[in-house]
Amino acid sequence: MKPKKDLNLFPYLYILPAAVIVIAFRLIPIILSFILSFFKWTIKGPEKFIGLTNYSQLLRDPGFWQSLTNTFYLVIFVVPITLILSLLFASLLNRTTKLSGLFRTTYFIPTVTSLVAISIVWKLIFSPQNGLMNHILGFFGIHGLGWLSESRGIFTLLFGAMGLKIPAFLGGPSLALFAIIIVCIWRSLGYNTIIYLAGLQNIPEVYYEAAEIDGASKIKQFFKITIPLISPTTFYVLIMTTIITFQVFAQVYMMTGPPVGGPLGTTKVIVYYIFEKGIDAQEFSYASAIALVLFIIILSLTMLQKRLEKKVQY
Amino acid sequence: MFKRILGKGITYLLLILCGLVMVVPFLWMVSTAMKSQTDINSGSIGFIPYSNVTYYHNEGKKEKANIVTQDKEFSVINIYSEDGKTFKRSYVKVPNSSLTFEKKIKFNFKNFSEAFSKVPFGRYFINTIFVSLCVLLGVLISSSLAAYAFARMRFKGRDFIFYLFISMMMVPQPIYLIPSYYLLTKIGWINTYWALIIPWVANIFSIFLLRQQFKTIPKDLFDAAVIDGCSRFGILWKIILPISKPILATTAIFSIIGSWNSFMWPLVMTSSENIRVLQVGLSYFAQESSSHTALLMSASTFSIVPLLILFLFAQRQIISSFVTSGLKG
């Protein structure tokens, strides 16, 4: 029989190295961030308690609203398009056995490569003079799009080309932000396709065989069997892509500007705004307040999606 | 039958199309990296790097030349000597009609060395490898110890501490970035390797992964070891770790990919050049020499290549571990 004291002390020694790091570089900063968002806080340290001043300033800050709107645009476009495309490609991959390993590897490459390098490459692709994108669009008779320098909304441009005028608030994300959206979709598509593929391979073949006997068409099988049975994967993809998209930073930092976030601030996303306020301007407390708003948004969306998942669970 | 073949055809067409979209940026990166700046500036888009060679015809002789200035009728040229490197004659005024142009495929491999010499990328590589290895070592040690305790020991507050850890995994990096910057400034770690390494030597996700794995090891194995007089640490060292090699490899791969590609943290925490890591160095290079497209693409290429090699070697393991760990989480 070992003494009881030994049982109590030893395990803590084992978790000590990890715990020290986690407490010092996660827990304390997170708590600090929350507390000091109610202070006037600069590089010298917390100076005085100012209550909700940072938060009320936030509500009146056009830069904050703009970055929030831009981030929402990003999420609204990236998440559903990624979801649909990755399910489509996973179903196609699931139907072929030949070359599927090759396709899987190919699709996955963007996931493991650095965002900085791919942003540099995509910036060149979107270059108006010698970029690949405009050259390809040239085949379709579209010339000279100033991708990353165009602040007008994509819908404004689209309907404008058809001779229609639409109100400014329906203009959609700027063309520059849309370029970022394309890169984000490209980056997340491969990973999510592979996740979906794993989910699809877990669906027992017998369901499809039974449906086949009952005479259900492929399309009907897809909507009546695949989509319901794949819903746990869908929720995982939904939550992860949302969280990741809310945190987009490197693409904006590397692809836009100078000044970063241009043209006219239409690509300034919330994490870049935190960076700008907190690191460049050293307004620590204000940046913390923005970070907390971001945290609350992400947390509530995650909870909402989890709740939704429970409701639609098959 | 015909319908099935058509279906297969469309399937493959879409898959190939998507595959192309996925890799074309990389292919273009590599091809642009090997183009000459004049080829890029000429607005040609192709994937094959060309060089334009100018020839000067003089009394039936064809000599390689280099245009200095040109107007409607005359050009001022330099004529190369036989070795093609030095000039035989400089600033010769000749009629345009005596010049011909030839497009030749030419891979400018020297862009890579030029980019490498222009910026201390060698230093950045060493910094990145050093930081990645230190983090890797720390993660492996701290995670296996903690995972062992969480999976195999009973102690007060175990579940609470574990869930506290897990919940912190959900907190996005921007949330703790600013206070971390402030704290690291206070303890004087800004612009040191400490700032790049220490906060990352514990990885909650790795602890979680290893704990899941350690839990699956049958209890009888431990009982037998205890009877044989094996200590607690001995059990971890001699039994658990050897049979968990695949999951340790996965943890290592995740750790290396994470360190190699991390950008925002080192960007914020360091500013001096001698401890700059590759990604930050690349971002500075991109800002400073945005017009040197070929060099920029060379730099991007060699920042990607090491991980790409790792990926191609271990792709099966990487993909499947991304998938299973993702689905478990």
Image (cartoon, coloured by chain):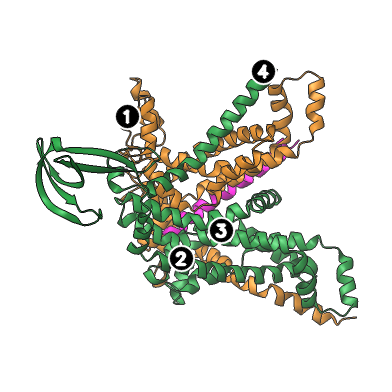
Chain colours: A orange, B green
**Mark 1 residue crowding within 10 angstroms, few (<14) / some (14–19) / many (20+):** few
Local SS, label 3: helix
Do the residues indicated by labels 3 and 4 lie within the same chain of the protein?
Answer: yes
**Amino acid residing under circle 3:** Ile
Q: Which mark is residue B257?
A: 3
Span of residues in magenta: A286-314
Residue B19 place in picture, x, y as percent: 55, 37
The span from disc 3 to disc 1 (Cα, nearest Å) is 39 Å
Q: Residue at x 31, y 32 (%)?
A: A144
The quarter holding residue B152 reads: bottom right
**Mark 2 residue crowding within 10 angstroms, few (<14) / some (14–19) / many (20+):** some
**Amino acid residing under circle 2:** Phe
Is A292 placed left or right of B106 in the picture? Answer: right
Residue B119 place in picture, x, y as percent: 35, 63
Do the residues indicated by labels 4 and 2 lie within the same chain of the protein?
Answer: yes
The span from disc 4 to disc 1 (Cα, nearest Å) is 39 Å
Residue A143 place in picture, x, y as percent: 32, 29
- Chain letter for mark 4, please: B
Residue B109 shown in magenta: no
Position above or below: A230 against A22: above
- Chain letter for mark 1, please: A
Do the residues indicated by labels 4 and 1 lie within the same chain of the protein?
Answer: no
Residue bearing mark 1: A143
On the rendered image, what quadrant is the C terminus of chain A found in? Answer: top right
Q: Answer with mark 4 or mark 2, whichever residue precedes in sequence.
A: 4
**Mark 3 residue crowding within 10 angstroms, few (<14) / some (14–19) / many (20+):** some
Residue bearing mark 2: B125
Do the residues indicated by labels 2 and 3 lie within the same chain of the protein?
Answer: yes
Q: Is residue B233 visible?
A: yes
Is A265 placed left or right of B74 in the picture? Answer: right
